[in-house]
Amino acid sequence: MSGPTITAIVPAYNEEEGIGETLEALLNQSEPFDEIIVANDASTDRTREISLAYGVTVVTPPQNLGSKARAQNFALPFCKTDLVLPVDADTVLAPDYVSLIKEPFADPEVVIAAGCVLTKNSRTMTERGRTIEYMFGFHWHRPIQNAANSPVVCSGCDSAFRRKDLVDFGGFPERTIVEDMDYTWSQQIAGKRAVYVGDAVAYAADPDTMKYLRKQVWRWMAGFFQNVRIHSRELLQKKRMLALWVFLAVWEILTVPLWYVMPLIWLFVFQWTPIVAGAWFFGAEFALLMPPLIYASIRRKISFWHVLMCIPALYVVKAVNFTYAWKALIVELVLFPLGLSKGLHDYEKGRADTPTSDRTAEPLQTVAGARVSASSPGLPARAVGAPDTPAVNPEGIANEGYYQGIQSSPKRLMRASKHSSRRVTGQT
């Protein structure tokens, strides 16, 4: 193993369905993590037991902390490596992700590096729409922003952070509902660099129903405008190129309704025929959309026929995006400053928790072949220490409550890579 040391943090609340796949991907990196920590945010399902069965470190707060940023901050003082890489509990990293994401940190000015995110599934309409959205964004917007040294966001599901800078900042910011964008902008305003690593690929699980798409988009859009409200002045003063990208994003939100009524204007004001109006509208749409999609399809080896079949769903997702973008603009930039709204501050996931009826005590199968369950002798009865133990806070992170212990299962899982050694944290 070469380069900086790295720890994965997996924030998890009721993630028993997907966390096993995530941990398997983390354990089978070509260049292994030095430590893997699951921040089990007081889950009520078997997230903790499944995580322990994979032989990783688990930290559990005394009560649910209520957001991804807080869960990550709870785990941060237990990280001792050069880099920290939070990975969503439903995200799968490609086997070479760690080796690729480390490379930019040879530059001491780089404090954040983010990979390319693709959808893990494309079964439902919302997932198919996201497939196109990600393929376009990560093969058009992100490379251009990266070339201009001004990425708008380093995705929270797969970005690596220089730990010292993160700790000096006070941990993952909790003042907005989207900590990844907040920290990306803050560090660039401070003169540090954030970079996009297109070869490092992560596969994320996206909302599979309209209900959860709306929840996720509302959180993303509200968080975007929270950051606009907080950072706009400093962006204009210290990071004008990033301010330009943010302005263009806001301009798009403001002008998209006009673009989609243009066919009606052409029909009824300019008296164009429906064929001519439709040809101009769809011709312009596809002229902008298709080149990045063709490139992404070739680069990622995704069937172009599959891409074409997903395009109609993009417009459903776009409709949701711009509906909630306008709502967020009004709430966060108009009503909040006037004291007429508190803004969005409750964190909601973009997927349902594991159904209660599915939370059974069925035995778990570890990779090593040992069968374990919540009641197995090999697993501790609890994943927390004494509730009156004072918080151990070696890095000065401002966390509420107590750090109530770390545990690892007795048998660490064997890595697929021959470079399999990593630090093991025992029970405290």
Image (tube, rainbow, N blue to C red):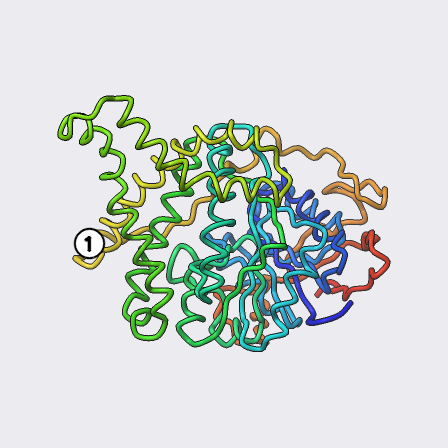
Q: Which amino acid lies under the numbered mark 1 shown in the image of this protein? A: Val
Measuring from the top left, give residue 47's x and y in whole percent.
64, 45
Instruction: Name the image quarter holding residue 62.
Output: bottom right
**Element on which disc 1 rests:** helix
Q: Nearer the viewer, residue 389 or 348?
A: 348
Q: Which residue is mark 1?
A: 334
Measuring from the top left, give residue 16's x and y in whole percent.
63, 40
Residue at 36%, 54% (x, y): give it. 223
387 horizontally vs 289: left or right: right
Q: Quadrant of the C terminus?
A: bottom right
Residue at 78%, 67% (x, y): give it. 1
Measuring from the top left, give residue 61's x and y in whole percent.
56, 58
279 horizontally vs 65: left or right: left
| Residue closest to the far left | 269
Residue at 49%, 37% (x, y): give it. 207
Residue 78 visible somewhere in the drawing: no
